[in-house]
Structures are given as structure tokens and as C-alpha cells.
């Protein structure tokens, strides 16, 4: 009898203890996210009419909870109206460069309470069929957000597609444009690795990088190879500069975003006139992944998908040297135009 009572008491104590620990964890998580929002963040008027430039305190919790449901299309019209949610055209776009770290940049910026990302690449401006559907179609592809938040989308194909600058200009001539770049030869190899993986998945064979990057007839760099052409950043940027002044661009160092993301993100916050809200707390190095991962609060964190951070195939050093030599003058021009110098060889 006594033994039975003791067992019952132990059981009760266990349940109470679990409840207490659970509540404590919940409170710590909640306070963690609230802390990062205090005080209310003033956002520069450019992202909202004057007098309405405060980010609601609930914004971050909303981004992780209800808003997530809304994005999945689970919201009723009444809920959207009650929460004053809107689908806004982007105020900033990550236009490229493919394999520069565009996904990491978007996900990391989304840590900011005033930023709401479009999860999918929309391909509105580079795809004629999508573009023909009109701007309302594009807006409807955007996530729900508070009017004071800004929407950001990324479609790296924009950077290299001929028609895109003019089309974006027609939508918003004062939009902010983000370009994330990596050392051009590394980016080209990363580009190749992605295509190679796609071929392997379909059980297809593919050429070696060396064969694609070097023209066998001339033994010179093959400028017809897309992975090479995409890395000639200055050529593409010059097309954009026919529509937008250089002040509307911000260049992100994709190599540094891998090793030291916070300073790069702080530069972007500044460029977007956002109050600094992303901190070292939000980024932690995951040794297994070999990359920084994202921490929203004590319970919610995530790393990028395994398709980011692939192992590159080994490339003949003479080909690497040739490519680096080829890119060198274009890189110099790129530094000159953008005012941002990189230590690329
Ligand atoms: P690799 O796969 O060559 O390593 P994009 O998103 O534009 O396709 O860029 C992919 C690249 O983002 C990856 O290229 C990877 O190096 C880089 N990257 C930067 N930060 C990262 C992060 N925190 N986690 C995973 N990949 C990251």
C-alpha cells in the first residue's frame, strides 16, 4: 500500500516537473525573440509612409507562427483582414549571382523582423510566360506581411537575363538591388557542380569541367560556356547600369558570407535602411555542415539544405590558373565600378 502511494507521488512529481521545465523553456524562447525586437524598430521612411514606420512588436512571432500558416494558404480572408496583412511587391531583390550564396543571403536577411522573404524563386522578370501574366500575378506570389515590413525575393537568373533590368525598372525605378558574388572561378566550378549533380541524378554522363571551360581548338577560355559567362560580373552589371545608378546596388561578398556572415549582413541592413537587428545570436557555426546555420530562438533553428555546400570536383590547376588570368581584368573593372574590392587572384 505504502509502496503504491510512493509510486503515485513520484509519478505526480514527474508530471509537475516536466510541466515546469516545459513552461520555462517556452518563456526563455519567447523572451529571447522579444528581446531582439525591443525597442520598436524605426525603419527609414523609404519603406513605409512617414508616421507608420514602426515594426509591430508581434512581427517576429508572427513570422514564425501564424504568418507561416498564411503563407501556406491556410488563412481565411477574415484573418488576413483582422491582422491587416498585405502582399507587397518587393522593395529589394537579390538579382544574383547564381551560386554566389543567394539562398543563404535571403534566409539570413529573413532573420530580421522587418524582412519577409518570398520562399520560392518567382522568375517573373526573366520568364516571358510569367511576365505576360502581369504585375498582379507577381504580387500575388508574394508572402503576406505587415505594411511596415519589406518583402524580398531572389531569382538569380535576373542578373544575366537581357530583358530583366528594363522590366524591373518599369515596376519600380527606385528598387534596391542586391548582388552576391564569389571569386569568379570558384563560382563557375560551383555552377558546374550543380549541373553535374542534376545530370548524375538522371543517370546521364557529362563532360569534365576542364573540357567545358577551355576551348579545345584555341586552348583559350571558352567564353561560350555559360558558367564562365555568368562569372564575368562586370559585363552583366554594365547592362543594369543603363537603367539604375550604382547607388541602387549593394554588392555582397559571398565568400565572406560563408566564413563570417554577420558583418556582411550588417552592411545589407545599412543599405536597406533597416535598424540593426541581426546579431551573432542568430548565427551559429555547425561543424557537421561546415557552414553557419540560423537561430531564430532557443528552440527554432535551421541549416540550409544539403544542396547548398556541395563538394566541388577537383579541377586541373592549369585550368584554374588560366581562368583566373582570364577573369582578372573583368574583376578590376568590377571593383572600379562598384567601389568594392575583393582579394580575388
Ligand atoms: P557551393 O555549393 O558551391 O558550396 P546559391 O544559393 O546562390 O545557389 O549559392 C550556393 C552557395 O551558397 C553554396 O555553394 C555555399 O558555398 C554558399 N553558402 C553561403 N553560406 C552558406 C550557408 N550558411 N550554408 C550553406 N551554403 C552556404
Image (cartoon, rainbow, N blue to C red):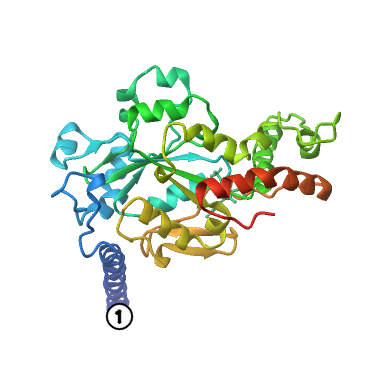
Q: Is residue 11 above or below residue 61?
A: below
> Which picture quadrant has residue 202?
top right
> Which residue is at the front of the view, 102 or 311?
102
Q: Quadrant of residue 178?
A: top left
Give the x, y percent position of residue 188.
67, 42
Q: Is mark 1 within 8 Å of ligand 1?
A: no
Q: Position of residue 282 (x, y in %)?
A: 41, 62
Determine whether the residue tagged by mark 1 lies in a helix, strand or loop: helix
The residue lying toward the viewer, choosing from 224 and 309, is 224
Identify the residue at horizontal 39%, vertical 58% (top origin): 300
Measuring 64% from the left and 43% from the top, which residue is drawn there? 330
Q: Is residue 183 left or right of residue 303?
A: right
Label 1 crowd (10 A; few <14 / some 14-19 / many >=20): few
Between 182 and 58, the residue placed more toward the observer is 182
Q: Taking 68 as reference, is 214 above or below it? A: above
Q: Residue at x 41, y 36 (%)?
A: 244
Residue 159 rendering spot, x and y as whole percentages: 51, 35
Q: Quadrant of the N terminus?
A: bottom left
Q: Looking at the image, how many numbered discs can be counted on the residues?
A: 1
**Residue bearing mark 1:** 6
- Residue 314 visible in the current orientation: no
| Quadrant occupied by the C terminus | bottom right
Q: Is residue 17 visible?
A: yes
Residue 280 spot, x, y in % from top left = 42, 67
144 to the left or right of 183: left
Amino acid at each position: 500500500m505504502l509502496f503504491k502511494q510512493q509510486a503515485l507521488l513520484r509519478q505526480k512529481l514527474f508530471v509537475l516537473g516536466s510541466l515546469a521545465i516545459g513552461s520555462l523553456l517556452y518563456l526563455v524562447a519567447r523572451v529571447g525573440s522579444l528581446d531582439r525586437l525591443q525597442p520598436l524598430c524605426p525603419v527609414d521612411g523609404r519603406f513605409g509612409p512617414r508616421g507608420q514606420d514602426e515594426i509591430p512588436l508581434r512581427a517576429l512571432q508572427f513570422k514564425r507562427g501564424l504568418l507561416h500558416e498564411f503563407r501556406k494558404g491556410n488563412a481565411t480572408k477574415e484573418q488576413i483582414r483582422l491582422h491587416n496583412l498585405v502582399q507587397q511587391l518587393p522593395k529589394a531583390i537579390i538579382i544574383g549571382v547564381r551560386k554566389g550564396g543567394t539562398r543563404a543571403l535571403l534566409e539570413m536577411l529573413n532573420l530580421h523582423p522587418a524582412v519577409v522573404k518570398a520562399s520560392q524563386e518567382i522568375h517573373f522578370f526573366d520568364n516571358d510566360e510569367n511576365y505576360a501574366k502581369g504585375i498582379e500575378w507577381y504580387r500575388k506570389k508574394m508572402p503576406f506581411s505587415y505594411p511596415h515590413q519589406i518583402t524580398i525575393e531572389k531569382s538569380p537568373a535576373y542578373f544575366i537575363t537581357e530583358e530583366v533590368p528594363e522590366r524591373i525598372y518599369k515596376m519600380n525605378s527606385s528598387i534596391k538591388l542586391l548582388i552576391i558574388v564569389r571569386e569568379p572561378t570558384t563560382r563557375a566550378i560551383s555552377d558546374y557542380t550543380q549541373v553535374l549533380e542534376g545530370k548524375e541524378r538522371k543517370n546521364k554522363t557529362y563532360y569534365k569541367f576542364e573540357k567545358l571551360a577551355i576551348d579545345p581548338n584555341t586552348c583559350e577560355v571558352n567564353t561560350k560556356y555559360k558558367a564562365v559567362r555568368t562569372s564575368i560580373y562586370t559585363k552583366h552589371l554594365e547592362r543594369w547600369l543603363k537603367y539604375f545608378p550604382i547607388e541602387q546596388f549593394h554588392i555582397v561578398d559571398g565568400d565572406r558570407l560563408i566564413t563570417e556572415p554577420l558583418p556582411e549582413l550588417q552592411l545589407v541592413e545599412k543599405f536597406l535602411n533597416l535598424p540593426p537587428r541581426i546579431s551573432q545570436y542568430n548565427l551559429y557555426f555547425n561543424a557537421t555542415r561546415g557552414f553557419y546555420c540560423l537561430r531564430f530562438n532557443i528552440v527554432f533553428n535551421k541549416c540550409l539544405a544539403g544542396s547548398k555546400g556541395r563538394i566541388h570536383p577537383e579541377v586541373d590547376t592549369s585550368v584554374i590558373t588560366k581562368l583566373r588570368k582570364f577573369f582578372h581584368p573583368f574583376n578590376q573593372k568590377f571593383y572600379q565600378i562598384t567601389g568594392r574590392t575583393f582579394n580575388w587572384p
